[in-house]
Image (tube, rainbow, N blue to C red):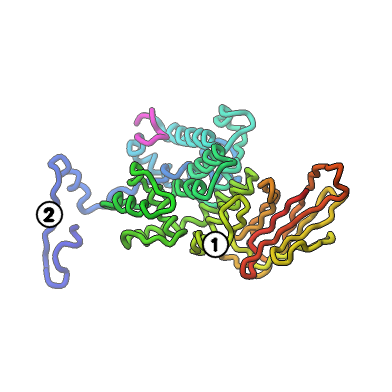
């Protein structure tokens, strides 16, 4: 305020007035011409940072975690001004008389305990082994995915809990709601009267929200994503900027969700998640897709020029629909080779191999470059005494020359 007082071109002197409470006058006098001390906010992101170090192998035990913390600016400020950080969750119960080493040990131990509680790390000897110096910290799959995609550990925990509760009964809108509740979207701004705008938008949305969620940033994210999927009109222009900020974070969050769903080997949920990812990134209307939204819907991210190499003798069942059958009598394993060409590295693409009838995911690969990708398909035969031959059926679905997905089913 002092620097902006007056007109620098016309005035030779200026006055700045600061109105405050009487008990804060001395405080402002002390810092009127000196900067405030720069404190660290690293403790707010310590769990995510420590998880990334454990997932990458930089931190493997408790002493290494302490050494990692001692090399941060947070540790230096903890030495100079410990009272500033005593109210944080990691230092509850500590006092000003505690040494810096005790404070650092409390921060690290509670961070590791929190990571173990949400399932990002583990040890071979149980929870108490986290505080033993010679025990190895092992990252879990959700901790590795959180580190790989630079997202919050709480987001991966939320994804895991939601998928465990509804592993086999998810729908497109349930997957979209799970995606909208990522912690990264908790900072979506809620302005004045936007609870009214949210309910107005909810009245035109395919999946409305309850009135109690009108001021929830995750519910607003849910509505914003529906405006992208169904070309809905936004109530005010600010919603366009909010949607852009959501879409900027969407690829890494959605890819982490897809990778996590693949761990559950549920082909139906993979198809729904990929369908959402494709339409949210490309911007196509979900209602204008050619495939129906039933259990046999086949939509995923766009993969260009996929063809199936046929070491077995393939018979075209229908040239129009792309169905092929292969005689695999006496064969236990089949290598399905998919050749991908003209793939841009700017977008993440996937190839999935799953059962059309069972909805079980057999193979899942992320594509970054062109080349051949092989799936080892183990044929589990259901014997029928009246059947003398065993057939493997594949379906390569094509949409305007771009192959989207390949199904494999067997009888």
Who is closer to the viewer here, 167 or 31? 167
Who is closer to the viewer here, 39 or 159? 159
Residue designated by label 1: 289
Task: Name the spot of residue 378 as percent of width and height, x first.
Answer: 78, 47
Seen at 74% across and 63% down, the residue is 318
Rendered view: 233 above or below 73:
below
Q: Mark 2 and mark 1 in contact? Answer it, CB < 8 Å.
A: no
Quarter location, residue 308: bottom right
CA gap, disc 2 and disc 1: 62 Å
Circle 2 packing at 10 Å, graded few (<14), some (14-19), many (20+), is: few
Magenta part of the chain: 87-96
Who is closer to the viewer here, 203 or 37? 203
- Secondary structure of the residue carrying numbered label 2: loop
| Position of residue 313 in the picture relative to residue 13 (left or right) | right
Q: Is residue 10 magenta?
A: no
Rendered view: 396 above or below 217:
below
Q: In the rendering, which numbered label is found on residue 17? A: 2
Task: Name the spot of residue 306 as percent of width and height, x first.
Answer: 69, 65
| Position of residue 346 in the picture relative to residue 317 (left or right) | left
Seen at 32% across and 53% down, the residue is 200
Q: Does the magenta stretch include residue 89?
A: yes
Seen at 34% across and 35% down, the residue is 87
Is residue 259 in sight in this rendering? Answer: no
| Position of residue 337 in the picture relative to residue 167 (left or right) | right
- Secondary structure of the residue carrying numbered label 1: loop
Q: Nearer the viewer, mark 2 or mark 1?
A: 1
Seen at 61% across and 60% down, the residue is 349
């Amino acid at each position: 305020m002092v620097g902006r007082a007056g007109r620098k071109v016309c005035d030779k002197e200026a006055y700045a007035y600061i109105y405050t409470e009487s008990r804060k006058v001395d405080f402002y006098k002390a810092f009127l011409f000196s900067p405030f001390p720069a404190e660290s906010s690293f403790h707010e992101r310590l769990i995510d940072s420590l998880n990334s170090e454990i997932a990458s192998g930089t931190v493997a035990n408790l002493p290494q975690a302490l050494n990692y913390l001692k090399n941060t600016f947070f540790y230096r400020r903890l030495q100079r001004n410990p009272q500033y950080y005593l109210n944080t969750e990691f230092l509850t119960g500590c006092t000003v008389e505690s040494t810096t080493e005790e404070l650092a040990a409390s921060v690290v131990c509670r961070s590791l305990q929190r990571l173990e509680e949400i399932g990002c790390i583990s040890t071979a000897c149980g929870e108490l082994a986290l505080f033993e110096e010679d025990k190895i910290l092992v990252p879990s799959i959700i901790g590795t995915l959180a580190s790989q995609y630079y997202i919050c550990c709480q987001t991966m925990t939320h994804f895991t809990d939601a998928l465990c509760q509804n592993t086999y009964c998810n729908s497109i809108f349930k997957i979209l709601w799970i995606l909208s509740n990522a912690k990264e979207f908790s900072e979506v701004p809620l302005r004045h009267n936007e609870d009214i705008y949210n309910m107005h938008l909810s009245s035109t949305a395919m999946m409305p929200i309850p009135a109690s969620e009108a001021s929830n940033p995750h519910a607003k994210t849910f509505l914003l994503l529906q405006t992208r999927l169904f070309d809905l009109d936004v109530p005010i222009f600010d919603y366009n900027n909010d949607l852009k900020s959501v879409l900027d974070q969407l690829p890494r969050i959605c890819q982490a969700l897809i990778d996590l769903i693949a761990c559950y080997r549920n082909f139906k949920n993979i198809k729904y998640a990929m369908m959402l990812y494709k339409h949210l990134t490309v911007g196509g209307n979900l209602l204008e897709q050619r495939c129906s939204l039933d259990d046999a819907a086949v939509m995923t991210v766009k993969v260009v020029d996929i063809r199936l190499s046929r070491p077995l003798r393939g018979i075209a069942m229908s040239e129009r629909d792309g169905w092929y059958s292969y005689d695999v009598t006496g064969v236990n394993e089949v290598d399905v080779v998919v050749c991908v060409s003209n793939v841009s590295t700017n977008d993440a693409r996937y190839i999935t191999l799953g059962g059309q009838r069972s909805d079980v995911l057999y193979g899942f690969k992320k594509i970054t470059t062109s080349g051949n990708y092989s799936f080892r398909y183990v044929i589990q035969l259901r014997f029928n005494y009246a059947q003398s031959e065993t057939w493997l059926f594949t379906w390569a679905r094509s949409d305007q020359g771009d192959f989207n997905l390949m199904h494999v089913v067997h009888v």
